Amino acid sequence: MKYYYVDSNNGTAGPVSLDQIRLLAGSGQISADPMVAPEGGKEWRPLSTLASIAPVPPPPAGSTPPLPDGAPPADSTPPPAAPVPPPLAAPPPASPAPPPPTGAAPEKPAAALKINATLLGDAVAGVLGIARKILNPGRIDCWLKVARDYGHYAVLAGAALTLLYALYAAIRTNQFVFFGAGVGAVLALMAGQFAADRFLGAGDKLIAGTPSRLATGAFLECVGLLALLFAAGAFLAGAAACVATRSVMPLVPALVAAALWCVKGGIALHPRMVGVEQEGGGSAGEEAVGLLLFFLKAGLKIVPLAFALLAVAGCVVTLLAFSMNGGPAGQGSFSSGPRLAGLPGMEGPALLLGACLVPLAAYCMFLLASLTLDVIRAILALPGKLDSLRK
């Protein structure tokens, strides 16, 4: 009779003889005591339970088994055999289950159902893994380079739009002050673009010259998750405000905030982009300093994106100023936004000038904050140096 058996991959194999199954078990190819089932049956049982009833294989042809001590030679007459008692009556067999179709293996035993206790957290980790692949360092660096280049084009376009709006407002309102404010705004944008061009590349040099380390990346993973959630929330809030006010204006700051949070989340998932290494060790104070440095360097890293987004937003606001609330003669278009010279419709040039000043402001803030953190580092390292001097 041949038997099916459970192989090393928890699958069903066979049918083969019990000797072949024993050979596989002895060589370690399958379990030492695999589950087996007879061909045409459905009941699975361990191989060890069949050892007592399995037939012993016959010796090879031509070989004579050794005789026990004191046994007569082979050509002598054997002693009479003892009478064999009649076999006991076997109990009536139970009705067998219908055999499976010919050639089909019996069903293997069902595995126990296992539930992962961290199923919800693993789902979030999977989403973060997808976000980590999408927001990879190469892609983020490419975005920042494109933002740096096209941000300057946006400043040029904004300066041209500012002159056009100033001329349009001066003719419509018959006030020369609009044209004078437009010319002054363009001169300010010229100086601002010069400063932006000089300080946009300085941030990367500061980041490279300020390495830091953290004991674990768990905090930064949570920061990345929160940043991505803030990005989605900013976009949804802006879309809801557009529907409520029936205006596209709330979507402009929402898109800027969503893009900045998205890139910052990608940097948190790849902290080596800002020179943060995860080496382990260090005190709690050093860990706090490392985290503060990460936030400072991440903010400095996304300055080119903030520059480009604010410049584009300034161009959009300047375009909308031509028709918002009747233009410059209306009842204070964009009355809640910052203005140049206090004139309506000059909110766009103000945004453009702010975009040009962002790199300079971020550079100065990073220097001041780094100086403070260096003082804190020196204070934290003082006890260790005193101990070394005592020894």
Image (cartoon, grey):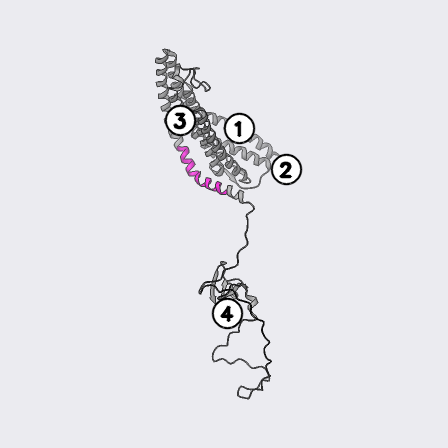
Residue designated by label 2: 387
Q: Distance between the residues labelled 4 and 2?
A: 73 Å
**Residue 99, relative to residue 55: is it above or below?**
above
Residues under numbered marks 1 and 4 in contact, where contact means CB atoms less than 8 Å apart:
no
Q: How far apart are marks 1 and 2 (CA)?
A: 29 Å
Kind of residue indicated by mark 4? Asp
Q: Which residue lies furthest to the right in this view?
A: 390
Q: What element carries label 4?
A: helix
Frontmost residue, 225 versus 10? 10
Frontmost residue, 239 versus 169? 239
Magenta-tinted stretch: 125-145
Mark closest to the chain's N terminus, 3 or 1: 3
Q: How far apart are marks 4 and 3 (CA)?
A: 80 Å
Crowd rating for badge 1 (residues with CA inside 10 Å; few <14, some 14–19, many 20+): few
Residue designated by label 4: 19
Kind of residue indicated by mark 3? Val
**Residue 88, relative to residue 257: is it above or below?**
below
Residue 128 belongs to magenta span: yes
Q: How far apart are marks 3 and 1 (CA)?
A: 29 Å
